[in-house]
Amino acid sequence: MQINRRFFLHKGALALAGTTVIPQFLIRKVMAETVTSPNKRLVVIFQRGAADGLNIVVPHQERNYYAMRPTIAIPQNQVIDLDGFFGLHPSMSAFKPLYDQGHLAIVHAAGSPDMTRSHFDAQDYMESGTPGVKGTDDGWLNRALQAEDLHRRCAGTCEHTAFRALALSADVPLTLAGKVPAIALSNVNSFTVAGPKPSPAAAAFQAMYGESGDQILHATGDETFDAVKMLRAANPAQYKPSAEYPNTAFGNNMKQIAQLLKANLGVEAAFTDINGWDTHQNQGGINGQLAARLSDFSSSIAAFWRDMGDQAENVTVVTMSEFGRTARENGTAGTDHGHANAMFVLGADVKGGKVHGKWPGLEPEQLNQGRDLALTTDYRQVLSEVVTHTLGASNLNVVFPNAQLQPNNFLKLVV
């Protein structure tokens, strides 16, 4: 079988119904024939469940922080100090070298301006990029890719690989939903599209292309399944990372994103998430459930950065969570749904080694509704700067409609 460039290109509707990864030997010649993809790649990580930003990036010089959290506050002598005022949770030691090297930036008191305390609504608002507006059916990252095409003056005519937008998840998340085709991969070593007994999703995929009157689509579909069979024989599990990842679901996802990026498949935007941040009870301080989650989170991202090696020069990582948690601990040694939070931005072009944003303070009169860290940076401000510099998505009205975001209001996170 001859594999040609049509296998790698979207022709209006190509979206894999399973999981694949193309090893270097298979694509080296083919990719030489395709349009070169932009060098910059963006990786988006969603912390689902509302992470406690105050115990992640600790304001250890705020006296009221300790007064409001008598059992779960991080002691000053245990905090990983960053700048004399803020410090990292001790379980996040993997982040300290990245911060010291100037690759990791933090934005505190950031988040969505919408006041909902519903996980479902808040996640939808953040992923759609339209806080407070229900029913938006596409995501900010998909629109950023559309804005990139507009910037390149090739809207509707650009050729991209099938892996331009991908998620390490069971389904395409709202963040990536939209006009730009995206694929969801649950495991790069599991080919659910191929095999003698295809899954229902694979069968539907085959039927869709088999019945298509468009011969380009039909041929692309056939080539997809043939390539998947080749990949099964090629054993993509032979990938050897250059760093040791935590043996966790999130660690595995970050490893697979590195694997896909390093395979030069034309990935421009990748998404994954990590659950377990809803700490209403027994949150813990230096130890406990939050500490364990933070160790996984920071160690997996740090391993990804090391694994990318020289290619990390063209990668930017940004993290977010739907909202923060209450400034005061509750009666069950946990925290409840709050408002502002902390975001991380990692990259070679990032102005790291600094906690960005305006700190609102934790005195009673400074709290949002008397209970939460107040918001001073709209998360869309952070994302706008990132997509402008990484994807060239300069038309911010496309990415975040009605947000009225301007480059002169950027935090200067990216240099």
Image: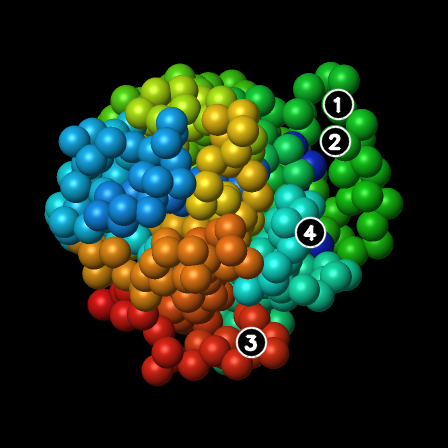
- Tag 3 and tag 1, C-beta contact below 8 Å: no
- Residue 168, given in percent of the width and then of the height, sits at 53, 36
- Tag 3 and tag 4, C-beta contact below 8 Å: no
- Tag 2 and tag 1, C-beta contact below 8 Å: yes
Residue located beneath label 4 in the image: 121
Question: What is the C-alpha distance between the residues marked 3 and 4?
Answer: 18 Å
Q: Residues within 10 Å of mark 4 (few under 14, many from 20)?
A: some
The amino acid type, in three-letter code, at marker 4 is: Asp
Residue located beneath label 2 in the image: 202
Residue located beneath label 1 in the image: 198
Secondary structure of the residue carrying tag 1 is: loop
Question: What is the C-alpha distance between the residues marked 2 and 4?
Answer: 31 Å
Q: Where's the C terminus, which quadrant? A: bottom left
Q: Residues within 10 Å of mark 3 (few under 14, many from 20)?
A: some
The mark that comes first in sequence, 3 or 2, is 2
Image quarter of residue 305: top left
Image quarter of residue 244: top left
Secondary structure of the residue carrying tag 3 is: loop
Please state if 373 lies on the left or on the right of 142 as rendered.
left
- Residue 42, given in percent of the width and then of the height, sits at 41, 53
Secondary structure of the residue carrying tag 2 is: helix
Residue closer to the observer: 303 or 279: 279
The amino acid type, in three-letter code, at marker 3 is: Ala
Residue located beneath label 3 in the image: 403
